[in-house]
Image (spheres, coloured by chain):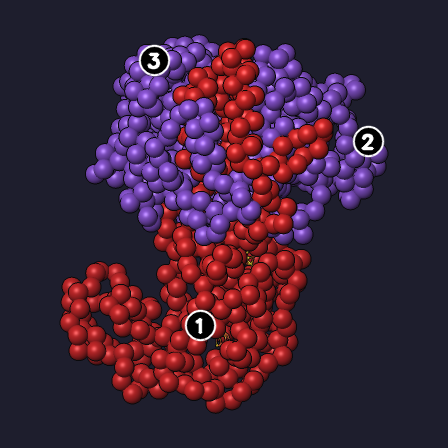
Chain colours: A purple, B red
Amino acid sequence: MTNSFSEFKNAKCFFCIGTNMTEAHPVAATFLKNAVRNGATLIVADPRKQPLTKYAKLFAQIKVGTDVAFLNGIMYVLIIEDLYDKEFVENNCVDFDKLKESVMKYPPEKAAGICKVSAEKITEIARTLASFKPVMLCYTLGITEHTCGKNNVMSTANLQMLLGNMGKESGGVNPLRGQNNVQGACDMAALPNVYHGYQKVTDPAMKEKFEKAWGVTGLSDKVGLMMPDMMEGLVSKKVRGFWIFGENLANSEPDISHVEHCLASAEFMVVQDIFPNETTKFADVILPSAAWSEDNGTFTNSERRINRVRKIKTPPGIAKPNWWIFKETAKHFGHEWPSNSGQEIWDNEISVLAPAYGGVKYHRIENDGLQWPCPTIEHPGTKYLYKDGKFSHGKGIFKSVEWTPPAEVEDKDFPFVLSTGRRLYQYHTRTQTGRAGMDALYKEETADISIADADRLGIKHGEKVYVESRRGKVNVTARVTEEVPAGMVWMTFHYREGNANWLTNAVFDPETKTAEYKACAVNVYK
Amino acid sequence: MKVTINGRLIEAKEGQTILQVALANGMYIPHLCYHDKVGAAGKCRACVVEVEGMRGLQTSCSVQLRDGMVINTDSETVKNAQKLVIDLMLSSGKHDCLSCEQNGNCELQDAAYFLGIERASVQYGDINRETDESSEFVYVERDKCISCGRCVEACNNVVVNEVINFGNRGHHTEIVFDTDLPMGQSTCVQCGECSQLCPVGAIVDKKNKGVARYWETQKVRTTCPYCGVGCQLELHVKGEQIVKVTGVEDAEPNKGRLCVKGRYGYDFIYSKDRLTTPLIKENGQFREASWEEALGLIREKFGKIIEESGPDAVAGVSCARSINEDSYSMQKLFRSVFKTNNIDHCART
Ligand code: SF4
Ligand code: SF4
Ligand code: SF4
């Protein structure tokens, strides 16, 4: 997030697109609801009539996978009606012409044909957005989990720059991150192209810096593989040794049959986790980890805040902290690492080697955490980025973005679009919530379908149905609901049985390699 | 500005109430409906005080200070009025502290203690209200409810879930869920905010019932292991057992609020399914192994693969649930030891 949760309070207007906040980020949603109660205007764009819509002044029920057309339609109105922030664009951004050129291809009538939101509503949303300064834009995986995910993200940034809403309190572009430490895993360089703090592996100066810091030579300056390519690499034998730490890939990745084929192809596989799960089955070696509350460390939340996590119990049996496992492995390869606790790793390595965290030390985050960038020990942390419209690399660059449909669209044999997400009472593949009493509140996968489709197909609420895609078939209970529009099936991946990922399409955004969990074609029948 | 409370000259800020300043200066005034989060309701009248120049007793939670105000919180009149309120509350409920969850952390009990009330003048004056056990995680014992209204405020105006209200049940006004449904069948999302703000033992967390007394537990601040909001939790720990979780009031980013997962989803760490020892697969079966053996095998296999096919023939996926220090260490292993940038995580799921 460019901005912070505490800024929800004073926001005047929210534009929430592809975020089922009340279920996926419930506490964030409470602050949003408080703001709406105090007079803030909420605009929601979502394929489903999800709970946030209850609080919305305007709701655009867009067709799955049409965000770019929708957002370009809005920007068309802003430009044609001269409603955009010319001063901000002039002073702080470049390539407005390129944006304009692409946006001009999406008059509201044309955008409406694609996204199924009326031209009038697109116009009304544009005018409403322009009438508030700033607007806080929030999104979640509804924007990113598409083959055009990166383009969707760029469109949200284009819109907020065009409206002059960047670098302002209670404004900005705010992706609410799904997992507790997905922000941290990125920050800490569990990414193939950067050292931690987003320092590029292709930069010779960085290579030298880290060779010196780590006391090694020969760090690779070649960008590594992203996860989907690793999986393919297992099949092609390009990747022979594979190490999975704490991810239940066999349930959480799209197209389970294909994923399991990849995992089964691994020549040698290490899985490090706290529970046996569908993925550990494929391992040659399983390493038992310390869980949350069994080790001291930090998580970084969506708003870039580095928070302490504390140990209150010992791990079971001879399970060990994860950093210990990596350190000991390094030792077996002849490398001695100095740090011997979460605090030593953070204070002496992470914070020292990345300017963004230079001022973050454990003694400063005993209570509330600090938000990076926080370069010095005196620095109070950064509540919102790009203050006064100053972007990290000079000016904000508008990107021309064209709409592309999902890789697989509905047809005669598979006439429904399947979209996926999460529910309040479970978390991901349930390895945790399934062992904390939550099954009582949500006990099985369901296929959510519209009342219209249920009537047409003679499907009753609570009845078992088949949902089938080109990749697989599941037998699940139908949940007939007004949340879902006709033509859509909505599911999650909490349970192995009836898991949506037997059906989802393993196609990815070409650059970010995010999978298209939000759209594939299926059929539903009794 | 300066005010005088019980003869003490005290510095106060514009907009503060008598209660806020008294509490901030270590002077206790009983208060049951007031809570920082829900503000003043002026409802329970436990916090009455005398203010010079104002007629009758004033509810200290709602009177804003003015420069030079002279306040008395411990006169005979004040104490008697406060006693009357607290006694009535104790008399009209089932206040058996012995096995009450809130014992030792109960604001009604504190008030009685402070006022020297040994027992209620009437015992079990008016008890026949329904206990609601229908919710998975929240337990409601209406006979302990003092009608302070905090839960109603909390549910409607703090977390805006709009479930609890006061409604008529028989000849009582009681808390009800939606249109007086059992809690477990109502639209309640079990966030537990009502339980966190209930000053007495009327709304409590089921998981904690009969498990540990408040004073036996240590309070440890930590961060929620579920979503990216990063709520700050207070773990109530007895020995190595988490017995209860509350939100840290005033903390960023959650200001004490939690959702059902953060508040009640903690016990997976104690599951008997946990992996407890390294395992090595042999002939399709896993067998237990020592760390030395497991890491030795990794050394051998990864070493051989890298030697034969180069560093890029190994790859790793890190964990978006685990601490920063773990992800840092894993990528350091891949980069500095294996010499490959084939490291990723599921940032995109
Ligand atoms: S609510 Fe308070 S006063 Fe009543 S029984 Fe429980 S501890 Fe005692
Ligand atoms: S648990 Fe939350 S939603 Fe349910 S009644 Fe209490 S405050 Fe309301
Ligand atoms: S308590 Fe709920 S909203 Fe807060 S971090 Fe945990 S899962 Fe997210």
Using the image, tell me which numbered label, if any, was put on residue A525: 2
| Chain containing mark 1 | B
* Location of mark 3 (residue): A203
**Above-or-below relation of B38 to B266:** below
Q: State which mark lies toward you, 2 or 1.
A: 1
Q: Which image quarter is the C terminus of chain B in?
A: top right
Q: Chain of mark 3?
A: A
| B46 relative to A431 in the view: left or right | left
Classify mark 2 as within 8 Å of ligand 3 or not, answering yes or no: no
Q: Same chain, marks 2 and 1? A: no
Other-residue count near label 3 (Cα within 10 Å), few / some / many at <14 / 14–19 / ≥20:
few
Residue in the picture at 77% in, 28% down: A473
Q: Is residue A438 left or right of residue A398?
A: right
Cα separation, mark 1 vs mark 3, equals 60 Å
Question: Is B310 or B301 nearer to us in this picture?
Answer: B301
Which quadrant of the structure image shows residue A8? top left
Quick check: is the Cβ at mark 1 less than 8 Å away from ligand 1?
A: yes
**Residue B198, position as x, y percentages in the image:** 48, 66
Visible residue check, residue B203:
yes
Residue A156 in sight here: no
Q: Which residue is mark 1?
A: B104
Name the chain under label 2. A
Mark 3 is on which residue type?
Answer: Asp
